[in-house]
Protein backbone atom coordinates (compact mmCIF):
# COMPACT_ATOMS: atom_id res chain seq x y z
CA UNK A 1 0.00 0.00 0.00
CA UNK A 2 2.82 2.37 0.86
CA UNK A 3 4.57 1.57 -2.43
CA UNK A 4 1.49 2.54 -4.44
CA UNK A 5 1.20 5.78 -2.47
CA UNK A 6 4.88 6.67 -3.12
CA UNK A 7 4.55 5.77 -6.82
CA UNK A 8 1.44 7.99 -7.09
CA UNK A 9 3.34 10.92 -5.54
CA UNK A 10 6.29 10.39 -7.90
CA UNK A 11 3.91 10.14 -10.87
CA UNK A 12 2.09 13.35 -9.86
CA UNK A 13 5.44 15.15 -9.40
CA UNK A 14 6.57 13.99 -12.86
CA UNK A 15 3.29 15.18 -14.40
CA UNK A 16 3.65 18.60 -12.75
CA UNK A 17 7.21 18.80 -14.06
CA UNK A 18 6.09 17.95 -17.61
CA UNK A 19 3.21 20.42 -17.37
CA UNK A 20 5.63 23.15 -16.28
CA UNK A 21 7.97 22.40 -19.20
CA UNK A 22 5.06 22.42 -21.67
CA UNK A 23 3.75 25.76 -20.39
CA UNK A 24 7.24 27.28 -20.58
CA UNK A 25 7.62 26.02 -24.15
CA UNK A 26 4.27 27.53 -25.14
CA UNK A 27 5.19 30.85 -23.53
CA UNK A 28 8.56 30.87 -25.31
CA UNK A 29 6.84 30.16 -28.63
CA UNK A 30 4.33 32.96 -28.07
CA UNK A 31 7.13 35.43 -27.24
CA UNK A 32 9.11 34.40 -30.33
CA UNK A 33 6.05 34.82 -32.51
CA UNK A 34 5.36 38.28 -31.08
CA UNK A 35 9.01 39.26 -31.57
CA UNK A 36 8.83 38.08 -35.19
CA UNK A 37 5.75 40.19 -35.80
CA UNK A 38 7.42 43.25 -34.26
CA UNK A 39 10.59 42.61 -36.29
CA UNK A 40 8.60 42.37 -39.54
CA UNK A 41 6.79 45.64 -38.72
CA UNK A 42 10.08 47.39 -37.94
CA UNK A 43 11.67 46.08 -41.14
CA UNK A 44 8.69 47.27 -43.17
CA UNK A 45 8.84 50.72 -41.58
CA UNK A 46 12.61 50.95 -42.16
CA UNK A 47 12.17 49.97 -45.80
CA UNK A 48 9.47 52.62 -46.26
CA UNK A 49 11.70 55.26 -44.66
CA UNK A 50 14.55 54.21 -46.96
CA UNK A 51 12.31 54.58 -50.00
CA UNK A 52 11.16 58.03 -48.86
CA UNK A 53 14.75 59.13 -48.20
CA UNK A 54 15.84 57.83 -51.62
CA UNK A 55 12.96 59.64 -53.33
CA UNK A 56 13.87 62.85 -51.50
CA UNK A 57 17.53 62.50 -52.52
CA UNK A 58 16.54 61.85 -56.14
CA UNK A 59 14.26 64.90 -56.12
CA UNK A 60 17.02 67.10 -54.69
CA UNK A 61 19.47 65.80 -57.29
CA UNK A 62 16.99 66.47 -60.10
CA UNK A 63 16.34 70.00 -58.81
CA UNK A 64 20.07 70.75 -58.53
CA UNK A 65 20.66 69.57 -62.11
CA UNK A 66 17.98 71.99 -63.37
CA UNK A 67 18.76 74.90 -61.03
CA UNK A 68 22.42 74.77 -60.00
CA UNK A 69 23.58 76.46 -56.84
CA UNK A 70 24.63 80.11 -57.19
CA UNK A 71 28.37 80.51 -56.83
CA UNK A 72 29.54 84.07 -56.25
CA UNK A 73 33.24 84.40 -57.17
CA UNK A 74 33.25 88.20 -57.11
CA UNK A 75 33.27 88.60 -53.33
CA UNK A 76 31.18 91.09 -51.41
CA UNK A 77 29.68 94.11 -53.21
CA UNK A 78 30.95 97.57 -52.45
CA UNK A 79 28.52 100.45 -52.30
CA UNK A 80 29.82 103.68 -53.86
Image (cartoon, rainbow, N blue to C red):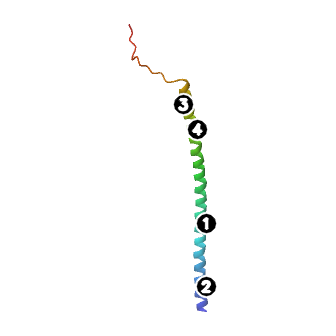
Q: Which marked residue is nearer to the observer: mark 3 or mark 4?
A: 3
Work out whether mark 4 precedes mark 2 in sequence or the reverse, and give the earlier one: 2
Q: Which marked residue is nearer to the observer: mark 3 or mark 2?
A: 3
Q: CA distance from mark 1 to mark 2?
A: 27 Å
- Identify the residue position indicated by label 4 in the image: 52
Work out whether mark 3 precedes mark 2 in sequence or the reverse, and give the earlier one: 2
The reply to whether the C-beta atoms of the residues labelled 1 and 3 are less than 8 Å apart is no
Q: Nearer the viewer, residue 65 or 11?
A: 65
Residue at image x 39%, y 16%? 76
- Identify the residue position indicated by label 2 in the image: 8
Q: Secondary structure at mark 4?
A: helix
- Identify the residue position indicated by label 3 in the image: 61
Q: CA distance from mark 1 to mark 4?
A: 39 Å
Q: CA distance from mark 1 to mark 3?
A: 52 Å
Work out whether mark 1 precedes mark 2 in sequence or the reverse, and give the earlier one: 2
Specify the quadrant of the image occupied by residue 79.
Answer: top left
Q: Position of residue 65 (x, y in %)?
A: 54, 27
Residue 26 is marked as: 1
- Badge 3 density bin: few <14, some 14–19, many ≥20, Cα 10 Å: few
Q: Nearer the viewer, residue 3 or 23?
A: 23
Amino acid sequence: MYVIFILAIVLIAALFFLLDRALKALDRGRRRHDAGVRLAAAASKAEEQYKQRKAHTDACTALTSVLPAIIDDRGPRKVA
